[in-house]
Every structure is written in C-alpha cells, then in structure tokens.
Image (cartoon, rainbow, N blue to C red):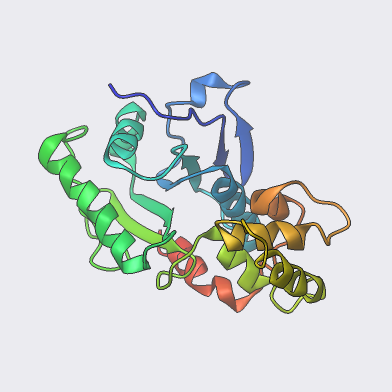
C-alpha cells in the first residue's frame, strides 16, 4: 500500500479534536456514518469549530495530509476500517489556481480512476453531478471546492470574505498594497493577507485553523451559506 506524504496527527469527532498520538486505535477506525475528508489541518479545525457553532454532531473529519491525488485518496480510503458502513462522504479541497469547475472535474476523475484501477472494499464510488451536491450511492459522495465552488482560491479566501468588514481590515489593505510592491512579494496573496489580519487581533494561534479555534471567524457570515448547505446535505 502507498504511504501518505504526511501522516495526520488529529481527527475530529462530534466537534472534538482528538490527538491520534494519544488514542492511536482511532487512526484507522471510522466512528461515524458521515465523514468529511479535507486536505490539511486548517481545514480540519475550520470544520470542527464551524460544526460546533452550527450545533451539528454525528460527523467525523479527517485530513489526508496534502493535496487530493489518486494515491492519497485511494490510500486513505483503503486504510479506513468500517468504510462500508459510511452513509455519506464529503471531499473538500481548495481550488488553488484553478477555477472550481476544473478542480471538481479533476477530483471526480480521481474517483472514477479508483473505480477502474483500484476498486476499494468492493464498493463503486459515484461522484456527484455537480459541486456542492451529493451522488446517489452507498456512500453518497459530495465535493466542495473552496472558497465558494466557483472562483479560484482556497480556505484563506473564504476567511477573508467573512471578515472583510471588520475594523482590522482597514489596517491590512494598505499594508498589502505596500507588500505587493516589493521585489519578491508573497506568492499566495490570500495566505499573506489572512496572516496580516490575524496579526491585528489581540491573541490568536497561527493560521485560519487557529482563528477558528479562537472564534475569530465570522461564522454567522452569509459567505458560509454554501458550506452550511453542503454540511446539511451530508
């Protein structure tokens, strides 16, 4: 079996972060019938605390430790015991430099490739017909592409939309105008801008995952309506 590039150290069950180093038996054991697979720890923390805000439980969240690819997705699914008990599976990734439709087609292709080349647990995985929706199957599969199932970007872009009218952004915008004039400006502007905004806060842990934990996200923002609908459709 292929090995993951980065072995995840934490999972989320019922809005609780669980350290797998303390409870290693949960590393490969699915606990819930609803599972969301994300790319990294920031995504894991975002969903954990957003679900807590929404008061939605009975969902498990795991990260694959990197960008969704054939080997990563296939390996994660193979190593999960009780996969055949899943009712629904949500796959969440960043659009990055692609438009969401391109990333959706890429991930759908990976799912079909797994069916054709490397069937898992005797189950045929059926990708959804469109972003944000779920297929008919066992498990039902849905795909959500950050920031909003439409544009290029990532989780940080969604975070910035949620806090766009906060006072700290008045400091961030002129700072970024200056930064972008440098000889070697940040390659991913949204990540730099998000960190700059977090620097305006009294106290926070690094990254948008830490911001979720410290309640800096505006979880009541309408910018999260599409994510909320995806969660409720799980």
Q: Position of residue 24 (x, y in %)?
A: 54, 20
Q: Is residue 53 above or below residue 110?
A: below
Residue located 37% across and 68% down the image: 99
Q: Nearer the viewer, residue 222 or 208?
A: 208
The quarter holding residue 74 reads: top left
The quarter holding residue 183 reads: bottom right
* Rendered-image quadrant of the C terminus: bottom left
Q: Is residue 123 left or right of residue 103?
A: left
Q: Nearer the viewer, residue 63 or 105?
A: 105
Whether residue 178 appears in this view of the structure is yes
Whether residue 131 appears in this view of the structure is no
Residue located 50% across and 60% down the image: 154
Q: Is residue 214 above or below residue 178?
A: above
* Rendered-image quadrant of the N terminus: top left
Q: Position of residue 231 (x, y in %)?
A: 47, 61
Q: Is residue 190 left or right of residue 214?
A: left
Q: Is residue 68 above or below residue 220?
A: above
Q: Is residue 162 left or right of residue 69?
A: right
Most extreme residue toward the left is 116
Q: Please give the count of numbered marks on the rendered protein.
A: 0
Q: Position of residue 105 (x, y in %)?
A: 25, 60
Residue located 86% across and 52% down the image: 203
């Amino acid at each position: 079996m292929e090995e993951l590039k980065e072995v995840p150290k934490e999972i989320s069950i019922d809005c609780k972060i669980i350290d797998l180093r303390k409870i290693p038996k949960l590393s490969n054991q699915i606990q819930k019938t609803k599972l969301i697979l994300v790319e990294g720890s920031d995504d894991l923390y975002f969903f954990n605390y957003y679900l807590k805000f929404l008061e939605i439980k009975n969902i498990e969240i795991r990260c694959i430790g990197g960008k969704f690819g054939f080997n990563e997705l296939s390996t994660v699914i193979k190593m999960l015991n009780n996969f055949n008990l899943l009712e629904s599976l949500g796959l969440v990734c960043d659009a990055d430099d692609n438009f969401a439709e391109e990333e959706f087609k890429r991930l759908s292709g990976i799912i079909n490739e797994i069916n054709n080349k490397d069937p898992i647990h005797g189950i045929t995985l059926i990708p959804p017909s469109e972003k944000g929706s779920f297929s008919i199957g066992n498990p039902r599969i849905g795909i959500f592409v950050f920031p909003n199932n439409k544009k290029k970007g990532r989780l940080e872009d969604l975070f910035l939309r949620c806090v766009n009218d906060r006072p700290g952004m008045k400091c961030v915008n002129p700072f970024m105008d200056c930064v972008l004039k440098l000889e070697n400006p940040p390659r991913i502007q949204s990540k730099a801008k998000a960190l700059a905004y977090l620097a305006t806060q009294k106290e926070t842990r690094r990254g948008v995952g830490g911001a979720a934990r410290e309640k800096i996200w505006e979880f009541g923002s309408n910018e999260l309506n599409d994510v909320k609908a995806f969660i409720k459709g799980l």
